[in-house]
Amino acid sequence: MQKKHHKKKIIITVCAVLCVHVLFFSDVFSETESVTINATVPAICGNGVTEGDEECDEGAQNGGAVCSAICQNVVDNGGGGGDAGGGDAGGGDAGGGDAGGGDAGGGDAGGGDAGGGDAGGGDAGGGDAGGGAGGQENNGGGEFVPQGVIAIQDIDLWAKEKTIKINTQDRTPSVLFAQTLIIEIREDSIPDSELLDSLVINDGGVIKRFTFRQTDSRYYTQIQNLRLGENIFTITAYYNQGGRKETTLLIQGNPYGQVTDGEAVVAGVNVTLYEIVGGNEIIVDATKYHQQNPTQTNPNGIYGFIVPNGRYKIVA
């Protein structure tokens, strides 16, 4: 009598933020892929991770995915599209796969940005072109009219106790949900800051006041328990002569990975993240980002990484 062997499937989630040496695009992304336990991740072209039989994968640079011709099951037939306006910053879809233009900003099936795609690089609810988030003016009926609004690129976002900076320059930032993020704004980036009375943020109906830190002249506060999906925050500057200005900030909360065996979740699976440095595979020291590597799936089969972006390999 032969025994039936069931292959377990694992959903890999990697979250990262672009390193300073990469010139184009920046974001935090969530990449989900299905692989077999005890195997490496299959090659996904252009996600900035060397996987499977790939010799290299430089991610979304120069309008397309470098090394795309050697990706498994990928024919480089023009590409050049992907997520118009930014791709996934070393982990996404910017060119290099879908013939003639990628997914029009949606994310490639089987390896896309799991809810964090750039939707064509448009203004996701705001105003700053290409930024995915923008400012909205609201004078509030006061006689004083502030000169401009707080620009999205002047808002600093930090994850993992300020060990990873999330870039807001190019598109809507995204990160694994349920995170606590720190928001900082320089005093000199606030229009008419000398007349500012208070700075607050509306976090899902909860109004929080920013605290001013004199040591570095910054206003700061925290966003706690980021929700899955689109999170909309309104930052309002109130002035002592009655006027006010608002800036809308969008942050995408992405899902974690999960290990499953058929319909059942699998707990206690070890997952190890390696960084490719000079052709060598080095286990990432995740302790400096307040995480463990290797990590294990929790009782619900769930896990995820948040690390600085680079060239990585995942082994489960």
Image (cartoon, rainbow, N blue to C red):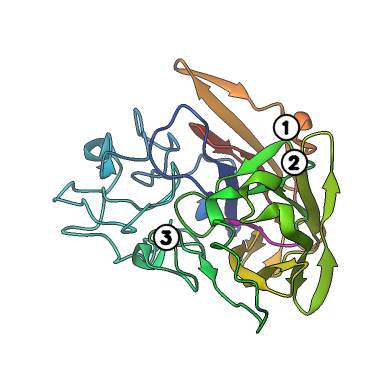
Above or below, 142 relative to 40: below
Q: Position of residue 112 (x, y in %)?
A: 43, 58
- How would you rate the neighbour count of disc 1 (Cα within 10 Å): few for under 14, some for 14-19, many for 20 or more? some
Marks 1 and 2: in contact by CB < 8 Å?
yes
The three-letter code of the residue at mark 1 reads: Ala
Q: What residue do we see at 45% from left, 58% from top?
A: 131
Question: Residue 262, position in %: x, y?
Answer: 61, 68
Q: Is residue 214 left or right of residue 187?
A: right
Gap between marks 2 and 1, in whole Å?
10 Å
The span picked out in magenta is 174-178
Q: Is residue 186 above or below residue 147?
A: above
Q: Are marks 1 and 3 in contact (CB under 8 Å)?
A: no
Quadrant hosting residue 111: bottom left
Q: Camera-side residue: 183 or 139?
A: 139
Q: Which label sits in the foreground, 2 or 1?
A: 1
Q: Which residue is identified by label 3?
A: 110
Residue 140 part of the magenta segment: no
